[in-house]
Image (tube, rainbow, N blue to C red):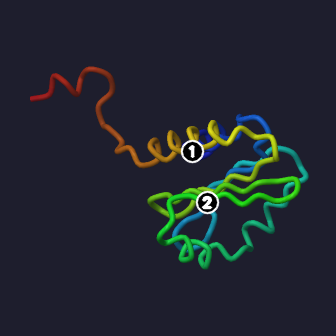
Amino acid sequence: MNDTILNDILKVQDVTAVILVGGDGRPMASSVTGSDFDLQAVEGGHWSAMSHTFNGFKEAEFVYENHRIFIKKAPAGLLVVVMGRFAPIAMVRLKCDVALARLAAPKSRFKGLTGLFRK
């Protein structure tokens, strides 16, 4: 389930990787395009210190020479998006908001209209 939600963000043009980092600093889920991204380095990173640093922030964007990193606060940690210079940031923000809403949505036992007709 988490992988399909992250893949929706990954479909945005020029997005390289999407990582959902838990509150303990360990990656809970990740999706990567291409082979030039080193996911092992991400898994060994200092994400717990980063999540404590972002305690008061909702989102942040880091711009480098050829890449950008967008970090959004999630209820369970951080959502990290690694992208190129030409990725549409508005679309990335929208997809992140939708993904976090889908992750936080309570799972319903009832499908379709059956929930309306319960007694």
Element type at mark 1 = helix
Image position of 31 (left or right of 99) = right
In the picture of the structure, the residue carrying the numbered disc 1 is 96
* Residue 60 vertical position relative to residue 113 in the rendered view, above or below: below
Question: Which circle's residue, 1 or 2, is located before the other in the chain?
Answer: 2
Counting from the top left corner in percent of width and height, residue 23 is at 51, 70
Q: Which residue sits at x=62%, y=44%?
A: 6
Task: Specify the amino acid type for callout 2.
Answer: Ala
Label 1: how many Cα within 10 Å (few below 14, some 14–19, many 20+): many
Q: Which residue sits at x=53%, y=77%?
A: 52
Element type at mark 2 = strand
Q: Which residue sits at x=22%, y=28%?
A: 115
Q: Quadrant of residue 94?
A: top right
Please state, as top left, top right, bottom left or bottom right, where the C terminus lies in the image.
top left
Image position of 92 (left or right of 52) = right
- The one of 82 and 107 positioned closer to us in this rendering: 82
Task: Specify the amino acid type for callout 1.
Answer: Cys
Counting from the top left corner in percent of width and height, residue 85 is at 82, 46
In the picture of the structure, the residue carrying the numbered disc 2 is 60
